[in-house]
Amino acid sequence: MIKAYLRLLMLMCSFSLFAQDYFPSNSGVKSNNSNYMAFTNAKIYVSPTEVITNGTLLIKDGKVVSVGKSINLPKNTTKVDLSGKSIYPSFIDMHTTFGVAKPKRGGNGPQYGASRSGFYWNDHIMPEQDVMANFEYDAKSASELHKLGFGVVNTHYPDGIVRGTGALIALNNDADNSLRVVDGETTQNFSFRKSVKSRQSYPSSIMGSMALLRQMYDDAKWYAAGNVDTKDLSLEALNGNKNLLQIFEAGSRANLLRADKVGDAHNVQYAIVGGGDEYERINDVKATNATVILPIDFQLAYDVENPFLASTLSLSDMRSWNQEPHNPRLLAENGIQFALTTHGLKSKKSFKSNLMKAIESGLSKEKALEALTIVPAKLLGKSNVLGTLKPGSYANFLIASGDIFEKKTKLYENWVQGMQHIITNMNVKDIDGDYNFKLAGNDYKLNITGSTSKTKAKLESKDKSLGTKISYSGDWVNLTFKTADSTKKEFIRIAANTANGDNLSGKAIMPNGAEYNFFANKEVSEAMAKKDKMDKKTSDDSPFMSPITYPNLAYGFTKKPKAETLLFKNATVWTNESEGILENTDVLIKNGKIAQIGKDLSDRSAKVIDAQGKHITAGIIDEHSHIAAASINEGGHNSSAEVTIEDVIDDEDVDIYRNLAGGVTSIQILHGSANPIGGRSAIIKLKWGESANDYIYDNSPKFIKFALGENVKQSRSRVNSRFPQSRMGVEQVFVDYFSRAKAYDQAKKSGKPYRKDTEMEVLAEILNGERFISCHSYVQSEINMLMKVAEQFGFRVNTFTHILEGYKVADKMAEHGVGGSTFSDWWAYKYEVNDAIPFNAAIMHNAGVTVAINSDDAEMSRRLNQEAAKSVKYGGVSEEDALKFVTLNPAKLLHLDDRVGSLKVGKDADVVLWSDHPLSIYAKAEKTIIEGVTYFDLEKDKQMREAIKKEKSELINRMLQDKNKGLKTQPVKKKEKKLLHCDSMDNHIHN
């Protein structure tokens, strides 16, 4: 009766809901319904913090009229008794692509200019894009979301770096867009990923995306001030959308911090779509003040039954499985506002199970409800109509059998804008469970599931499974099953009524036509009772979480190390100063500095280390490295001076720790050699465990990478279409860009308004002697060329790196004042290095050039002391000078020799304690210290290895437990770490 009345009521509502009042009616008499509907005797969650027991919810015309315990109901009110049931506000997903088809790829091959006119110069910037132009309501997807509890979603077009506006859509399958579209412009959407529809090559890296966004904001400000005569519809849209919620799809903790960095530079506070790994640097995430839109795409346990495959799993991957479900709890405990989203889930069905897992891992139910209701409503500016069941809100609510966040709770209905969407028929009795019955002397066990939706049954007798069919309608169950005698095709039929409490009773008809009374007793089996008891015990216990380390992978610190006062006694000290090598000498480190060097030193507060028979040197400095970075090349243009490696430091690269184990304390992370004018460097100290920004030197000297030769003219490129294509063309790129930078600098200094161009700003710094060039180089003709170009524009090249033909032009290099950072003995790996010789470093050194030995390789950098030693063999360089090739000389080239590179009182305590002569192949770094902090200790490393084994064993056992419980697992896939070099291209930003 109630269902019939509801259908009638909804039909009546349709006249007013689905036709806007100014539309003409040609299908009959126009009619308005003015009836109310009251849901009574329910536990009503008006909001996460306001709960009414035995309350009434009154709705009309798709809105909440009133909610409370005692409500005066109008005469024209239909009542629905919900005794024993609960009502919740329906959920909101604020980051989806609902109703939007996946963008189609726009062809192959590079494109260096924009394909559109009247818009921004880069195709991947599309703020003018309106999601409604690509929107088509998807009732099937809506029904899937209904089952998860969602009533409203914010959707957007998932293509490009700036993706345009999003829209807020009510999941009302019985309406049209005139009612469903709550707001057609809610958000401005961003990402680091390029559009798939455009072939425009720039940007080709994360750092390129960041630089493009920064330039876009500068250009938008310039455009808004009326300084541009031409029309730019993209910048107009960007400025027009600035008051909308700005959502940035980052996808990881590292990219979240990068996105916030871009926003901070232009006073934009993004709401950021995270990656579920925010717990790794929770304080850094909190410092952004960003609301996190949080996916809960938790990893499955790995199938670790095969011990050989299991041994290939990294500790970080194993930890991710264990730690990710705790992420929502940790965000909540640290006061970080977040909204939950289905984004990133391969199957939306896993949303509820993952949400339950988060709650089991400590997320409170109140916070979970907030993250699905009031938080997204507030962010979208719709708190007055969404997120709660307060009067005036949309009648968007869920009817459930109980606590919506309990596994056994059934969701019955999802009402959207006052329209009913049935999930599970609450008027159908739930008969799920296990039953026992006897029939003709045989014992049977019956299991029924899905009785309120799609009923299924399993039947066993004498440990044998019997083929069974079941139907359930009204109060009657019809069951047909095969007899236990497999030699006969005979069936038993049962018709049973469900009205007798929890039991089933009726008639059974045997294969011979005989009839028996049938009675099945529903029981809580010992196994179920035990399981419930275990579930309760599990829920009462604190869930296990593997400890978070800094960084959160193998060899990370449980607590970040701190500076100590250290006194090394009786060491052989290589000062790299005029004092030379000092025997049986003490070194005191205090307050992060070298405090004293001498004999018989003492300090009561110092930790004394016996260094008898050991050697102390300054920390090794690698002038040319590509470790600890998420991107190396931005090759979309022939100049990328606007990008900086500082944006993409990877503080979780295990090669940092491996380099510390080789005595390396500082490196210059150089941009690659994809273009003549590359990006800016990051000069860092290897402070393992610190956040990315804390790696960067304070007041770091400004450097940029240039490149010559085969790489920049794309000698091995399959496409081979970007200028320059010859060594002559490379020279013209330099002359052209420096000429433009000179004109830009003059305009800037004139005091007149000028358009800020980051690329030109950087090149002007070179002209003004504020930024230094490290240039990838091989062939003598090009080396001469760049020195002449520099002299033409009044500056000098700082460093030629690689410089394998430096020995041919060493005199000219010394005259120009440029240093050489070379390999010890690499050659013949491509045509332009055919003339390389191992005496190169010695010849340049003897000619008066400041020489360093670099690695350009994550593996070689661990043995730079041995690489330096080769110059003793090839060229007879003294041992002291050879050591300087990897300590003091690279410090000089990086303009850091006043801070590091030698052991001198007052300098930074970047020190290595070696077990043997530092140029010996037998020497091991026993301690590597940076500013008084011991970041590598050989003895502690041994302890860490044992701890790693123990933790992996613990996690493997827990994964095996998951598999034994019947939970899904994922196969182990061996991952190869990609080592980055000069020619490595980014693959993070392509959809």
Image (tube, grey):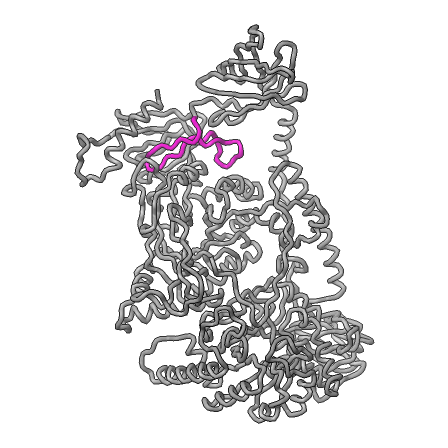
Residue 7 found in image quarter: top left
Question: Does 47 appear above or below 762?
Answer: above
Residue 44 visible, this angle = no
Is there any visible trace of residue 528 in the rendered image?
Answer: yes
Nearer the observer, 38 or 145 = 145
Residue 804 lies, with reference to residue 83, above or below; the image says below
Main SS of residues in magenta: loop
Left or right: residue 430 versus residue 104 is: right
Tell me if residue 419 is in the magenta stretch.
yes
- Side of 592 relative to 75 (left or right): right
Kindly identify the residue that appears in the image at 38 percent across and 24 percent down: 81
Q: Position of residue 705 (x, y in %)?
A: 53, 77
Residue 711: quarter of image:
bottom right
Q: Which residues are magenta?
A: 400-425
Measured as percent of width and height from the top left, residue 681 is found at 54, 74
Q: Is residue 567 left or right of residue 483?
A: right
Q: Percent x, y for residue 272? A: 45, 56
